[in-house]
Amino acid sequence: MRYRLLLFLQMINLISSGVVPPRKRFPDAIIVGVKKSGTRALLEFLRINPLIKAPGPEVHFFDKNFNKGLEWYREQMPETRIGEVTIEKSPAYFHSKMAPERIKSLNPNIKIIIVVRDPVTRAISDYTQSSSKRKRVGLMPSFETMAVGDCANWLRANCTTKTRGVNAGWGAIRIGVYHKHMKRWLDHFPSQNIHIVDGEKLISNPADEISATEKFLGLSPVAKPENFGVDPIKKFPCLKNDDGKLHCLGKTKGRHHPDVEPSVMRALKEFYGPENKKFYQMVNHWFDW
Ligand code: A3P
C-alpha cells in the first residue's frame, strides 16, 4: 500500500515537473464539418490557446483512410503533454455515413464540433472551390445550371430529380441539408458532447465563438477581441501577432464568389427554408438563414 502511494506521488511529481515526455494521443475533440463553413478558421483561431494542439493537414481517417488502422491515425497526431487538448478537423466527416459510428467506437465520450453557416452561401463556396480545382478538366457549368438547371452531364453530379425546383442530389446542395446528417451524430453522441459554432459569427465576432469553443473543451478561454484584425482586402478576420502584424488564412480561403441570379437565390432559399427549420429544432438553436 505504502509502495503504491509512493509510486503515485512520484508520478504526480514527474507530471508537475514536466518530465513525463510528450506522446501522440488520439484526439479529445474533432471538428467534423461542415465543409466550407469556416472549419480552417476555427482551428487556426483555436490555436491561440497554447493548450490546444492539432495536426496541420486534414487526416480523413474515419472516411477515406480507415483501412490504415488506428495506429496510423494516432501517428498523425501531434505530441502532447498531460492537460493539453488534441483536436483534428476533417470536414467531410459531417456528411459521411460511417464516420459517427466509427468515431464512437474509438471514444464514445469524444467532443464533436460542427461549424455551420447559411447553406446557400456554403453551396456557392463549395461550387467556387470545385470550379477553381477543375480549371484543367474544363470549365464547370455555371452555379445556376448546377443548382437548378440541367447539370446531368457534369461528372458525378446527380441532378436527375428535382426537389422544389432544385437539384437536391448535387453534393453542394445535399451537404447543406444539415438535419439529415445531424441526425446521425445525435444518434451516436449525447447532445452535451456536440458543440455548434455559428460560421457567420465566426466571421463577425471570432473572439466570442472561439471562447465558447474553448469553454466547451474544458479550457479557460484565452481568445480576446484584440487577438483579431480584419484583412483589408478580403474583409475576413485574421490573427493579430504581438507586433500588430496580421496573419490571415491562405489564398484558398475567402475566395471571390460568383454573382448568382436572384431567381436562383430565391429558389435555394425556398428549398432550404423547411430543411433549416428541422435543423434548428434538432439542435435547439435558431439561426437567421
Ligand atoms: P470562401 O473561400 O468560399 O469564402 P472551410 O475552412 O471550412 O473550407 O471554409 C472556408 C470558408 O470559411 C471560406 O469560404 C470563408 O467564407 C469562410 N471563412 C470564415 N472565416 C474566415 C477567415 N477568417 N478567413 C477566410 N475565410 C473565412
Image (cartoon, rainbow, N blue to C red):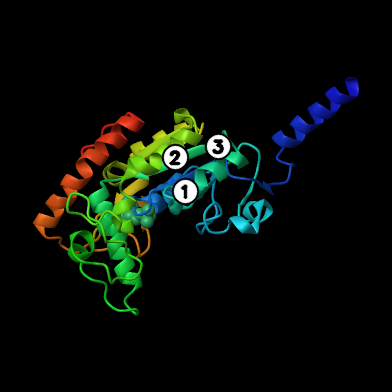
Circle 3 residue: 110
Dot 3 beta carbon under 8 Å from ligand 1 = no
Name the side, left or right, on which 162 lies relative to 133: left
Q: CA distance from mark 3 to mark 2?
A: 15 Å
- List the residue tagged with mark 2: 184
The quadrant the C terminus occupies is top left
Q: Quadrant of residue 278?
A: top left
- Mark 3 surroundings: few (<14), some (14-19) or many (≥20) residues within 10 A: some
The residue to which callout 1 is attached is 97
Task: Please report contact status of discs 2 and 1: CB closer than 8 Å, yes or no.
Answer: yes
- Residue 209: percent from left, percent from top: 36, 38
266 over 85 or under it: above or below: below
How would you rate the neighbour count of disc 1 (Cα within 10 Å): few for under 14, some for 14-19, many for 20 or more? Answer: some
Q: Please state the horizontal and vertical placement of residue 255, each as a whole percent of the image.
A: 28, 63
**Which of pointers 1 and 3 lies earlier in the amino acid sequence?**
1
Q: Name the mark on residue 210.
A: none
| Badge 1 amino acid | Lys
Who's the residue at 86% across and 25% down the image? 4
Residue 225 position (above or below residue 57): above
Q: Residues within 10 Å of mark 2 (few under 14, many from 20)?
A: some
